[in-house]
Image: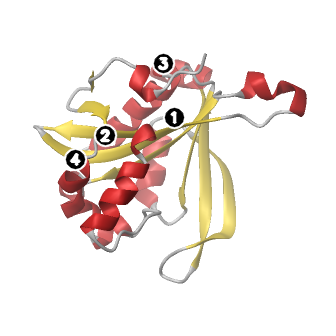
Amino acid sequence: MTLALTDLDWPVRTDRLELRPARPEDADAVWPWYRLPEVQEWTTTLSASLEDHQQWWANSLASSVVGILDGRIIADGKVSLQDAWSQADMVRQARGQQAELGWVLDPAVQGRGLGTEFAAALLDLAVDGLGVRRVEASCFAENFASRRVMEKIGMRCEGVFVEESLHRSGRWLDGMSFAILAREHRAHRA
């Protein structure tokens, strides 16, 4: 049986953060910082208005988790269940065996280790909560902060893809893929 984020016990607490599934009304709370140029530099979705952002947010709720610090949402993340690649006769066994992570942090709280704390909690949710065997995350190679977070939580770079990503600046940028197996994550925490 494949679990969903809604099946987990909430809220989840870290040293400084409280995590819970995102709600429709959270779109308005994150909009002031989500739309900032320094955030939009690396996000995949650019909303032109609050209404567009609310629609995009509503469509991503199934895999979305927010991080709260002192009563305010300072991070948005995703834990998206995926099927592992398999041969045709193994499709059922590969179902829901991996997850993709992603995160966005309010620039006002950057530089305090909160992004790493949040990403580590997302990784724990995927491995311990959802029981996946592999977790992946991707970024533009020039997004050094995101790359560093992936490294800090124990993920390894598995690929650099030369000019494979068209950035909204009009430039073709290198992409990077990171991953970690559940057993590696457990060993890294120990």
Q: Secondary structure at mark 3?
A: helix
Q: Secondary structure at mark 4?
A: loop
Query: Does label 1 or label 2 sit earlier along the sequence?
Result: 2
Instruction: Give the side of residue 182 with respect to residue 7, left or right.
Output: right
Task: Tell me how far mark 1 sits from mark 3, CA to CA.
Answer: 15 Å
Query: Does label 4 or label 1 sit earlier along the sequence?
Result: 4
Q: Nearer the viewer, mark 2 or mark 4?
A: 4
Q: Are marks 3 and 4 in contact (CB under 8 Å)?
A: no
Dot 4 amino acid type? Glu
Residue 167 placed where, x, y %?
53, 74
Dot 3 amino acid type? Asp
Dot 1 amino acid type? Gly
Query: Does label 2 or label 3 sit earlier along the sequence?
Result: 2
Residue drawn at x 46%, y 31% as measured from the top left: 123
Q: Are marks 2 and 4 in contact (CB under 8 Å)?
A: no
**Residue, disc 2:** 22
Residue drawn at x 48%, y 18% as measured from the top left: 128
**As drawn, 79 above or below 46:** above
Residue drawn at x 55%, y 38% as measured from the top left: 155
* Other residues around mark 2 within 10 Å, as few (<14) / some (14–19) / many (≥20): many
Task: Tell me how far mark 2 sits from mark 3, CA to CA.
Answer: 19 Å
Task: Tell me how far mark 2 sits from mark 4, CA to CA.
Answer: 8 Å
**Residue, disc 3:** 128
Task: Tell me how far mark 3 sits from mark 4, CA to CA.
Answer: 28 Å
**As drawn, 39 above or below 87:** below
**Residue, disc 1:** 154
Query: Does label 3 or label 4 sit earlier along the sequence?
Result: 4
